[in-house]
Image (cartoon, rainbow, N blue to C red):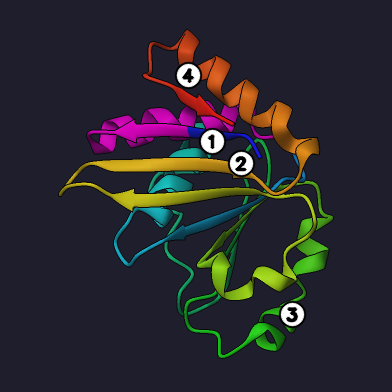
Amino acid sequence: MKEFRYRADSEQATDHWGQLLAETLPPGIVVALIGTLGAGKTRLVQSIGAALGVPHGQITSPTFVLVNEYQGRVPIYHFDAYRLRDEDEFLALGPEEYFDAGGLTFIEWADRVAQCLPPDYLEIRIQVLGPKVREFVATTSTASLEPLVEEISRRCSAHDSPPQATE
């Protein structure tokens, strides 16, 4: 599968990455976010939301409510699977309805509910490289989404970001 790496050396760089994703992600996409505690999963969703017109401070971690909905130019559905006991508990939230609702669906800790994800989704792994340094690795679940990763790479190149696309 195609992969794209984006290195953010600051929170402003993460905001830049979120802006590019907001411009690129198609309505209806499911984004599986994977990373350790404090890696920046919620921060990335906040950056995307801000770029889509969600008021600053409105997007918070859904850890205790499990799913939040936000209205911007495109609806955002934000799940957190961290506190779920199992995949059945995730399915009880009705994720399929959100997947089919035409918004952007973000699932933090998606690796905990991997069997519940739709066949086509974008995975973004966040690796902590330093106190403010993150590497975002975007990978497709299927070949049909490879053009999306290529478009993300193209947009990052056009905005003077150091893209690293690999096969």
Residue 132, image quadrant: top left
Amino acid marked by disc 1: Gly
Residue on which the image places disc 2: 72
Gap between marks 1 and 3 measured at Cα = 29 Å
- Mark with earlier residue (2, 4): 2
Residue on which the image places disc 4: 156
Of the numbered discs in the image, which one, if any, rests on residue 53?
1
Give the crowd class for mark 2: few <14, some 14-19, many >=20 residues within 10 Å: some
Q: Secondary structure at mark 3?
A: helix
Provide the residue span drawn in magenta. 5-26
Q: Quadrant of the C terminus?
A: top right
Gap between marks 3 and 2 measured at Cα = 25 Å
Gap between marks 4 and 1 measured at Cα = 21 Å
Amino acid marked by disc 2: Gly
Mark 1 touches mark 3? (CB < 8 Å): no
Measuring from the top left, give residue 94's x and y in whole percent.
77, 75
Amino acid marked by disc 3: Leu
Gap between marks 2 and 4 measured at Cα = 23 Å
Q: Is residue 166 left or right of residue 10?
A: right
Which mark lies nearer to you, 3 or 2? Answer: 3
